[in-house]
Each structure stands twice: as structure tokens, then as C-alpha cells.
Amino acid sequence: MLDLYTDATPNGLKISIALEEMGLDYDTHQIFLGGDQMTQEFTAMNPNQKIPVLVDDGIVLTESGAILIYLAEKTGQFLPSAPKSRAATFEALMFQMGSLGPMFGQLLTFAAAWDNKFPAVTNRYFAEVSRIMAVLNTRLEGQDYLAGAEYTIADMAVAPWIRLCSIHPACAELPLQQNGNLNRWWNRVSERPALQRGLLNPEPYAPEKQFEGFVKAVVGLGTLHAAA
Ligand SMILES: N[C@@H](CCC(=O)N[C@@H](CS)C(=O)NCC(=O)O)C(=O)O
């Protein structure tokens, strides 16, 4: 049995998607980001004090990209073995981890948590996420999935971020429709039953509580990450 410490955020949901897609049994432990991540017990698992954390038979693993690779290697699923396709999967996964996720995170921070108090900063991240979406659109030219013909852990990593365009008011203006390949990819992956189950596990807290947790976790707004 696997234990997943997580919340209903894109970095957490990508692991739920993988666990569902791979047909693994797991227990979900929902972490309220308004403080649960700072407890001694959680910090012992992840000194970086962030979800997701996966515990599997004595292994405590952090960093969603590493967790996805671990699960793919453990099950032999969704990570091609041919070197070129495998490298393309890692490439798309690293792009999510290094570009799409961090820039989206900053957009949400300045558009939502800071309530667009600094429009120039919000606009900078809006423009950068838009640019990154166009890069993904180009990558998807002539192929169904981010690493090529096969659905892989890279698609699982990107999906919860692109989903924000349809569910988060701060992301509604992002150019999903204008990027036809990306839009078609989103329609394709979001039809998958396992991906749909993953996106619902865990369910978010009530909107006010979910937002409270997000704001408290934002450096410069909440007190959780005050300088020591
Ligand atoms: N690089 C990490 C990022 C994880 C991350 O940023 N988690 C956020 C939620 S999406 C979190 O736990 N934030 C709580 C905090 O910063 O206090 C990963 O991919 O696992």
C-alpha cells in the first residue's frame, strides 16, 4: 500500500492521476496548506515542507517529477523504454517542472493571492505562461501526446496545470482555444477516466479554506514562511 500526502493542487493531483492510471492501491492523506505542511511530522518526511510526498514501503519520496518517474519505473508503465521516446518524456516532464509549473504558480500568486495588486507583475507571468502554452502547442504539432505517440507521465504532469484554464478565474483568459494542438490534447487527455478520477482526489477543501491555505503558504503574504 502506498501513502500519498497531498492536496488538490496541480503538483499533488499529477500524482493522484498517475496512481489511478497505473491501477495502484493508495491511501490519501490530505494536507491543509495553511499549516499542516509545517508540522514536525510532515517536515520529517519533507524538509522542504511541500506536498506531494509519497511513502512506499520505507521509501519517502518528494518532488512530483521524481515521484512520477519512480511510479513509472516501479510499474513499467507510461515511460517508454526506447531511448529516444524515453528522453522525449523526460524532456517534456522537465519542461513542466522547470517552466510551466513555476510560471503558472507565480501567475496564481500575483493574480489571485495578491489580488492583482501589482498588475505589471501579474502581466509578466500571464505573458510568460501564454508563451509557454504556445511552446507546448508547437511541441504537439503532428503528435497526440507530449512525448510523441504514447501517453506518458509527462502528459500527467502537464494536465492539472492546463485544466486551470477551465476552472480557475485567474486563468480564464489564457490562450487555450487559440492553441489548437494544445486544446485538442487537453480534450483528448481529459476524457481519460483514470485522469478524471485523479483530478478529484483529493477534493479541494471548501473554496474559502482552500484559498486561505494558498494565501498562508505564499511568501510575503502568509506568516508560515516568515524569515527565520
Ligand atoms: N517542486 C515541487 C513543488 C511542490 C509545491 O510547490 N507544492 C505546493 C503546492 S502545489 C506546496 O506544498 N506549497 C506549500 C508551501 O509552500 O508552504 C514538486 O513538484 O513537488
Image (cartoon, rainbow, N blue to C red):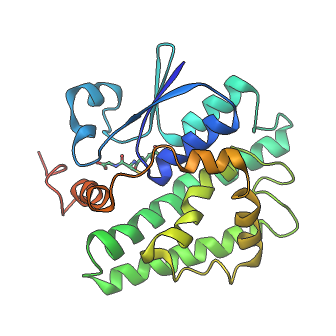
Residue 55 picture location, percent across and down: 47, 23
Quadrant of the image for the C terminus? top left
Quadrant of the image for the N terminus? top right
Query: Which residue corresponds to the image point at 25% horizontal and 38% vertical from the top-left?
Result: 36
Q: Is residue 194 left or right of residue 86?
A: left
Q: Is residue 199 above or below residue 82?
A: below
Q: Is residue 34 left or right of residue 134?
A: left
Q: Nearer the viewer, residue 101 or 39?
A: 39
Query: Which residue corresponds to the image point at 54% horizontal and 52% vertical from the top-left?
Result: 97
Q: Is residue 131 above or below residue 64?
A: below
Viewer can see residue 154: yes
Residue 106 picture location, percent across and down: 39, 67
Q: Quadrant of residue 110?
A: bottom left
Residue 44 picture location, percent across and down: 29, 25
Viewer can see residue 95: no
Query: Which residue corresponds to the image point at 61% horizontal and 34% vertical from the top-left?
Result: 19
Return the residue found at the far front.
206
Q: Quadrant of residue 132?
A: bottom right
